[in-house]
Image (spheres, grey):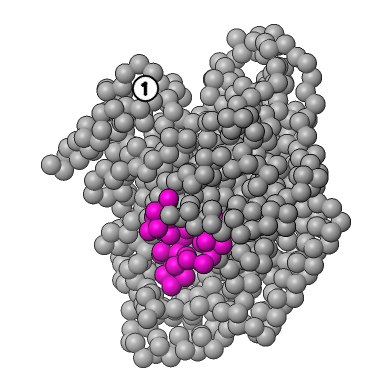
Amino acid sequence: MKALTANRLADGEVVFWSHGRWVERFGQAELFEDDAPAGEAEAKAKSQPTVVVEPYLIEVAPIEDGVAPVAYRERLRALGPTNTPDHGKQAEGGHDVELIAKAAGAARSGGRVNLIKR
Amino acid sequence: MYRYDALDKEFLADRVSEFRHQVTRRLAGEITEDQFKPLRLMNGLYLQLHAYMLRIAIPYGTLNPAQLRKLAEVARTYDKGYGHFTTRTNLQFHWIKLRDAPDILASLAEVDLHAIQTSGNCIRNTTADPYAGATAEELDDPRVWAEVIRQWSTLHPEFSFLPRKFKIAVTASVKDRTAARTHDIGLALRRGRDGALGFEVMVGGGLGRSPHIGSTIREHLPAGRLLSYLQAILRVYNRHGRRDNKFKARVKILVASLGAEEFGRQVEAEWAQIDPASADLPDTELARIRGFFAPAGFEVLPAVSAKLEAAKAADPALARFLRNNVHPHKASGYAIVDIALKTPGETPGDATAEQMETVADLAERYSQGEARVTHEQNLVLPHVRLDDLPAVHEALKAVGLASANANLISDIIACPGLDYCALANARAIPIAQHIAQRFADQDVAEDIGELKIKISGCINACGHHHVGHIGILGVDKKGEEFYQLTLGGSGAEDAEVGKILGPAIHASRVTDAIDDLVAVYLRERQPGERFLDTYRRTGIAPFKEAVYAEVH
């Protein structure tokens, strides 16, 4: 399973693709079971250079009661820095934040599709 | 400190206006991200995990109260109320919006601050001894020379597109507080046999994925010939540096591959071609710059302050602060005060807007209008009267800055790591917090004594892990955060790259491993030995055994 993410150009905010628009919370992100629609969404995102910077697909996996990004790096992006729980998306709380915070394993490299550019 | 003249201010205003135009064009889609990225980087603006990061240059780590207050204002207005001091003595804001960046730079320019030389393959912000102008150890004020280098190197057309970034440090004391030998060029002011002032020139130091300690290519360069000699070094580097391979592009690789002797020979040959009259700074200009750093007028005061002695006897916390954070000053009756941004449990190097304002007030009232930033992510009040130390301590305590742990085990360098940085493999801050909390008992920390722990979240080594007495490097091992420990490094005058202790260990084991290493030191140490001294005497074996005992 995959999701599409980027940083918003104007303010750098972490955003996720959801059916043609960008949302700020991972819990609202569109999840792609198949590669083809994920690739189509990525192509659309790349055609929005004044909205986002460097959109890319991430691996997402089921966890208890939901889904979370596989890579620890991506979970950090979806939550905020661990040294300041009152900063970033985690500050707002919510079910999706609690779920992602519970997920474990995988540091930086795992879970980002096409991380190594050839 | 150096003050910008009308020309400098006009230049900064033009630069901000240029960047404002570039940001507008990027937001409007008139230029692509690929075109814009180098432009924003040249203005210190990086895109990190959660937001943009703006890195502001603090030349040779010197700040005046107006600048500190401005940084506090930017922190409150445009960030989340704090800033992060770095190992290059710069300040980073981690929650910046691109659309605000031009306004922030305009605001900073009001107090002669900017983000030039904080990114790109140019000569970066030059660092100097944070005790400059205050310590009796120094031969000259290194900031004079750092400012000379700053003016010479800023946007130098020949050296704006070097093979890779280039860092210079200047020290004038035997005790090196700048990590000079880990710089592309380290400059140490020395007296020649004839008493003349000159520089020992060290080249090819650097950390990152291939750590090197700089080699001395000239024992004594006449001080007045500094710029032409730097030009010669940069020319040899610019000519032969490995532009084909980013990982081999730093001057340290060139020096290592040619050999320091051959590199030095080429520099001397290049130097001989340069006309001193056109390349070196005229004495009149040097005198003008020196004038900005004229020694502050110190009162004639007794070496012992009765007021301070009485306060010290009544307040054990003040006594501890004096023991660990207060250092001798060249003027009788004065002291140098380290403000450790290392309260156990807090993020190393972070300061809130309120803390910055308090330090600004203290600098203004008690330290002749000066504060400094150290490469160990701390602040310094360089000129405090002994009589004023109790008041300074109280004021620091009120904002959580009186941590009496300078140079102790909890005075840890940590890069922002994976919590913020797009390059990191693992987190550095939580590791530092956890270790500092484990050793928060100040009696224990003082018993352990000087112990420099340095943590980097990736091999780029912004946290200087290679030169930590204990270095900690975050690695991504099969998707988990693991940490490789190194021992015996030093960034000081006895610079050395640490040795890898053994296989990387899981994040959850790091603090216990530090505990094990400290226990070996406490067991093995001889009177007067620091951790580093004991390690150098015993070698790595007992430490290795302690950490990996369970594994074997």
- Quadrant where the C terminus of chain B sits is top left
- Quadrant where the N terminus of chain B sits is top right
Q: What residue is drawn where x is 31% and y is 31%?
A: B536
Q: In the displayed image of the protein, which residue is found farthest to the right?
A: B6
Q: Main secondary structure of the magenta part?
A: helix
Residue where numbered disc 1 is placed: B529
Residue A72 percent across, percent down from the top left = 37, 62
Q: B277 or B347, which lies in front?
A: B277
**A5 shown above or below B530:** below
Q: What residue is drawn where x is 61% and y is 59%?
A: B273
Residue A100 percent across, percent down from the top left = 40, 63
The residue stretch that appears in magenta: B233-261
Q: What residue is drawn where x is 84% and y is 53%?
A: B5
Residue B169 percent across, percent down from the top left = 57, 46
Q: Amino acid at mark 1?
A: Glu
Q: Secondary structure at mark 1?
A: loop
Count of numbered marks: 1
- Left or right of A72 in this view: B308: right
The answer to which quarter of the image holds residue B509 is top left
Residue A95 appears in view: no
